[in-house]
Image (cartoon, grey):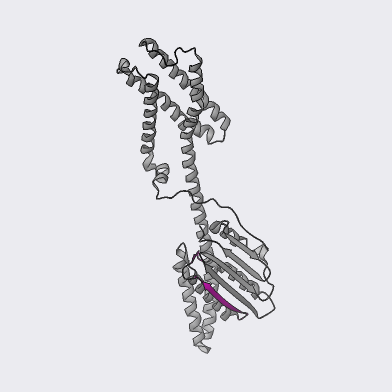
Amino acid sequence: MKDTSMKVIPIIGNDNSFLYRFLVSSRFRVARHITVIVALLVIACNLVLFSCQGYIEMLGKWTYLLIFNMFLLYGSIFYFNLLYLVPRYLLKQRYLTYILSLSTALIVVFIFQATQEYIVSDIFSVPNIYVGYSKVAFVMDYLSSFPLTLLSIMGGGMTVLLRLWILENQRVMQLEKIRLQSEIEHLKEQISPSMLFRVLHYSGEQALVNPGKASKMLMKLSQILRYQLYDCNREKVLLNTGIKFLTNYLELEQLVSGKFDFHMNASGETGRTFVFPLLFIPFIQYTVKQIEIQEEHPASIDIHLHAEDENIQFNCQVSIPCLEPEQELNKIRQRLDLQYGENYRLELTGQSIQLELKGGGK
């Protein structure tokens, strides 16, 4: 008995949301830079107007030059961090080097800012708000603003990490979908060739002696092929459609081999619950295969499916101990991990397969 579950990276973001498209789409690259530039202009205006409050009229047009210089200072360190420090150090997990480099660059910016304030105070005889650059107030102000400014600039780099994180998770989910689709195609290939050959061969033999049986077999085979050609191309199918497919498959196997009997019982909201295509067929194929290689015949298979509130319980009981759960069903577990993550419980014994699905999957 084994309880199998695995964590899978969840889908990140909604492709239709504006925030997702704004962060990820190349169409919004210019808009992202414009947003940064506007924010830097607001910061530059605030710094200059605060440090020169009460003396704006005295400075006149020089105020715009001061704002432009401040904008260049903080714009330079922002894009230096974004275009150089983040890809060179942060993305390579060299965190200490990244923090030290950014701190050094910020100290240089503060030196230029203080120099500008000193020049303005000296040329225009504007009293500085710190009343002298040797005072403790000047040093304390820059020391207190240093960590906040550092975190703000680092926050700009975090948007790059967030964008890369979203794209990486999107790539992982696309790979998982491709993998699941390839597994479904592999299952379809496993079902069609062998069954098609056996059913056509056997129905050809029965066409002369028992035309009704041959016609019934071909009808069920056509329904199976239709399910594989059309329904399996959808992301999810109704549970009652999958149950009908399982019933047709078992009836054909029963008619061809005659080595087992089966009973299918379905209850609950099977007409409103959706599942992934070919979800249960690997269990049925494996069970039939194990029965056919046993010398003890006939065997019986009892299958019960119950659906309620998007939760599904699948129970397959075999009358003889023929299952070897630890060796044959690893691929099925991997598929369940991808489709349901931690929202399933699988228990396997020598005579039973019990699967409980919680929710509609991913």
Residue in the image at 52% along x and 54% along y: 176
Note whether 169 is above or below 231 in the view shown.
Answer: above
Residue at far bottom of view: 209
Report x, y in % for residue 75: 41, 27
Query: Which residue is nearer to you in this view: 187 or 276?
Result: 276
Residue in the image at 55% along x and 66% along y: 312
Confirm whether the magenta stretch covers residue 273. yes
Note whether 166 is above or below 211 in the view shown.
Answer: above
Q: Quadrant of the N terminus?
A: bottom right
Residue 249 seen in render: no
Residue 139 seen in render: yes
Query: Which residue is nearer to you in this view: 298 or 274?
Result: 274
Tally the numbered discs.
0
347 relative to 232 in the view: left or right: right
Quadrant of the image occupied by residue 327: bottom right
Note whether 182 is above or below 27 in the view shown.
Answer: below
Q: Which residues are magenta?
A: 258-277
Query: Which residue is nearer to you in this view: 86 or 355?
Result: 355
Report x, y in % for residue 134: 49, 12
295 relative to 262 in the view: left or right: right
Quadrant of the image occupied by residue 325: bottom right
Report x, y in % for residue 314: 58, 69
Confirm whether the magenta stretch covers residue 354. no
Quadrant of the image occupied by residue 296: bottom right
Residue in the image at 36% along x and 37% along y: 30
Note whether 136 is above or below 78 in the view shown.
Answer: above
Report x, y in % for residue 71: 38, 25
